[in-house]
Image (tube, rainbow, N blue to C red):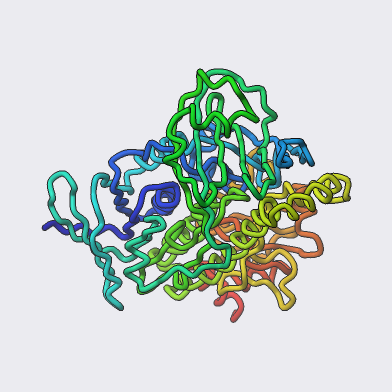
Amino acid sequence: MSVEQPEVVVVGAGPTGVTAAIQLAQAGVRTLVLDRWPDVFPQPRAVHFDDEVHRILARLGVGTQVAAISVPGAGLRLLSPTHATMAQFDRTDPRTSNGYPQANMFDQPGLEAVVRSRMHELPLVTFRGGVEVTTVRPNGPERPEVEYVDLTTHEVHTVRPRFVLGCDGANSIVRAAIGSTMRDLGFGEQRWLVVDIATPRDLGHWGGVHQVCDSNRAATYMRIGETRHRWEFALRDDEAAADYQDLDALAPLLAPWDTDIADFEVVRLTEYTFRARLADRWHRDGVFILGDAAHLTPPFIGQGMGAGIRDATNLAWKVAAVLEGTLPVSALDSYEAERAPHARAMIRLASLVGRAMTAGGPVGDRLRGVVVPLLVHLPGVRGRVLDSTTPPLRRSSLVDRGALRRGLGGALCPNPVLASGERLDVEAGQRWVLVSRTAPTRRYAEHLSADDAVVIDAGATPELDRWLGRHQAALVRPDRTVMTVGTVEGVMKRVPFGRSRDTLAAAERS
């Protein structure tokens, strides 16, 4: 039995776990990543990420590579049961305030290969694939303990890190270890056939998501790459994926899109059960759960993978700050306080969208046939249908929402190109950001360490100036979430980190 001493152990090397590991390493944290698979899982699963997730991936150092393997989504087309177009919502803005396309289609193994390669570049990350985690013990005030076995040599290893991040999926052993259970959010269960097809031929379809609004056979189609296509079909009670194991059996389902399927290659064919569930507890004694271990969502708004990546981004910088001593351990309570309500809101939205597009039987189909064609003519509807903005985070020790929960607290700071020619994220790196129309007074400025924070002049960037609105300044966390807004002095008094926090307090007393 061998013993290792990383500061953080990440269980699971999917997109959530690798994102967490990279961000921890970027912040100087020694991290061990454990996964059952020695390499990227070869089958496609997620196919969409939004502009916020694209922004996060760029901050990992893979923005250019991710752009090269993804295709911007053209929008949403709603089809009747006969596949007639009832409404089409075209995306016209190539980039959002995050600096990236609003919707992006991709092949998950390709994306995972990119981020996995980035992880391997970082000397502070140790990856061990081909292992099985057998035990996770929170251990109260002591360090948590993780045991895993090498599946080739059968050697057992024990690890006692400061923190454990469970990114180990829907059947999470880490979730069980902290005594957490999944709570159903009322969507029920839907069984769908998911079919990934490769073909060298351009099928000539419009480049957005095609959603068939049919209570008898709901379906979704999207192009996810140069040669890759994804179809999803609702399964009836008397059907199973085993009924569609070859192209001949699939032909009737694919016929509305293409009847010439001779050059189609089935990359993956599987049955998914769509659920809406949320863990009732997200951490215990230094052990946390993220991604599918903490929440499961129906796929109707394409936020399953993105929710896990948001979890990782929310938690990683906080863990690093606690290890550095610039935040108290109690600050980690803000992870669940912020992310659980956000995940619940996104799951409920996905459930609502799913029901609106597929439920109601023949009456629902007739109602959609009348209502949906009218939507494109209603002012503001296109923007709301296509808007990728997610809700602000709830109030926590690191988010000040204000008494009426209005304003910028908990929302994302924009990512414009600054006067330097760099985007805000590049300029700021892993630091906090003070966005202000006026510079801090001398007694504040001289105590604001450049290692902790960067000051950005909103007056020199019209996008930031408009974004601040009536506020003079905003304090932005390393994950680009706004902690608080107000006057420069008021914002600076809320600085929670390290040397700046201590010396600012001294400045106030002087």
Q: Position of residue 69 (x, y in %)?
A: 53, 31
Q: Which residue is at 13% across, 50% downward?
A: 154
**Which residue is farthest bottom?**
509
Q: Tell me the quarter of the picture where residue 112 sits.
A: top left
Instruction: Please say if 317 is above or below 403.
Output: above
Residue 360 versus residue 95 in the image, above or below: below
* Residue 6 percent location from the top left of the image: 27, 57
**Residue at image location 68% in from the left, 35% down from the top:** 208
Front residue of 469 and 109? 109
Q: Is residue 244 left or right of residue 342?
A: left
**Where on the picture, by quarter, is residue 510?**
bottom right
Q: Residue 293: where, in percent of width, then height?
A: 42, 60
Query: Is residue 418 visible to us here?
Result: no
The image quadrant that residue 54 belongs to is: top right
Q: Write the residue at 74% across / 69% down.
A: 406
Number of numbered tags placed on the structure image: 0
Is the N terminus in the top left, top right, bottom left or bottom right quadrant? bottom left
Q: Horizontal and vertical percent for residue 349?
A: 65, 59
Q: Does residue 11 appear in this view? A: yes
Q: Is residue 389 left or right of residue 384?
A: left
Q: Nearer the viewer, residue 138 or 249?
A: 249
Q: Nearer the viewer, residue 5 or 93?
A: 93
Judged left or right of residue 343, residue 209 is right
- Which residue is outermost to the front? 238
